[in-house]
Amino acid sequence: MSNIAQKAYAAALTWYLDNGVDEALDGAPFDRTKVAANVSILQRKSGEEPASISGLSQAAKPSSRPASPDHLPLGASDARAESVKLAQAANTLEELREAIAAYDGIALKKTATNLVFCDGNPQAPIMLIGEAPGADEDRIGKPFVGQSGQLLDRILNCIGLDRTERDPAKSIYISNILNWRPPGNRTPSPGEVEASLPFIERHIQLARPKIIILCGGVSAKALLGRTDGITRMRKLWHGYQPQTAEFQAGAEIIPAIATYHPAYLLRTPSQKKAVWADMLMVQEKRKEINIL
Ligand code: URA
């Protein structure tokens, strides 16, 4: 390969990485060696010359492979019905973790390395909910352990909270809307959020926090059932109630505040003051409900 071609390939890979494409994955496992084999069989049958992979006929391209039962995820409504059923049956956090691990309604499970369920102190009166695990969280199996998690820890330390604290009053409990990493850290799809919502809502019911911090737009929209952007939703107290109809009966209203995601702050440090204002509101609420 010439130097110029090498540079071009390196530049293309850097561009993919910059755009979050850091995994060579299809939506489901796919054995490309079989495509090449099938194509040459087809070609031999029809007497054609072997074609390069990029010149495959539409019928032989990976995206048009016939769907086998292994490739078909549950339909969206089945996936949601199944997650509601499994979440309802879980009566402890450990049972919920097991239910999520056993759930096959989200294809992300096949591409992720670890289930990311929680970190911090489940007795803490404050629960923080982010979006989805990234590469570091997927590797380690805990939420917010990468660069944005380190910034989050520093923010929480400023209001006297530390996820490693044994004293619940000084600790925090952390989870995400999704428990599996979307490849390349892409934004979760609406279907993935819908299928995961019953699990995080049951998670909230079992952890019984007194305050919820919603970290980023995906989390705020999903749990508040809103379509507004995060900028409109922050700076206010919301009353969180389950969006999942099956969990609404007798549910307590929990004060919830939405704030910017630390990954956004890493890209836009000028917004740190906005998050500080949100954290001061959390302090006020802690005083008001006697948990400070
Ligand atoms: N971003 C999130 O929203 N959650 C994590 O756990 C890590 C990064």
Image (spheres, grey):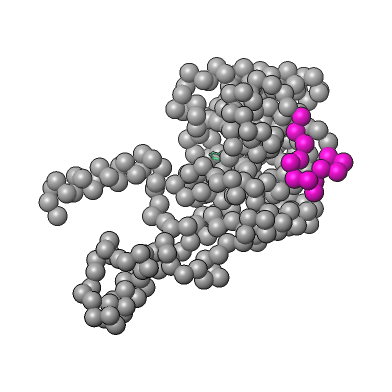
Where's ligand 1: which quadrant? Answer: top right
Residue 142: % across, % down: 58, 45
Horizontal relation, residue 266 to residue 285: left or right:
left
In depth, the one of 70 and 113 nearer the eye is 70
Give the vertical position of 236 relative to 253 (above or below): above
Residue 37: % across, % down: 32, 75
- Based on the picture, tell me whether residue 249 belongs to the magenta stretch: yes
Give the vertical position of 222 relative to 91 (above or below): above
Name the residue: 48% across, 61% down.
28
Q: In the current view of this chain or complex, which residue is farthest to the bottom?
A: 45
Give the vertical position of 269 relative to 40 (above or below): above
Name the residue: 69% across, 49% down.
199
Assign the N terminus to one quadrant of the image. Answer: bottom left
In depth, the one of 37 and 176 nearer the eye is 37
Asked which quadrant contains residue 55, the reply is bottom left
Question: Which residues fall within the magenta stretch?
Answer: 239-251
In depth, the one of 219 and 75 nearer the eye is 75
Asked which quadrant contains residue 223, the reply is top right
Assign the C terminus to one quadrant of the image. Answer: top right
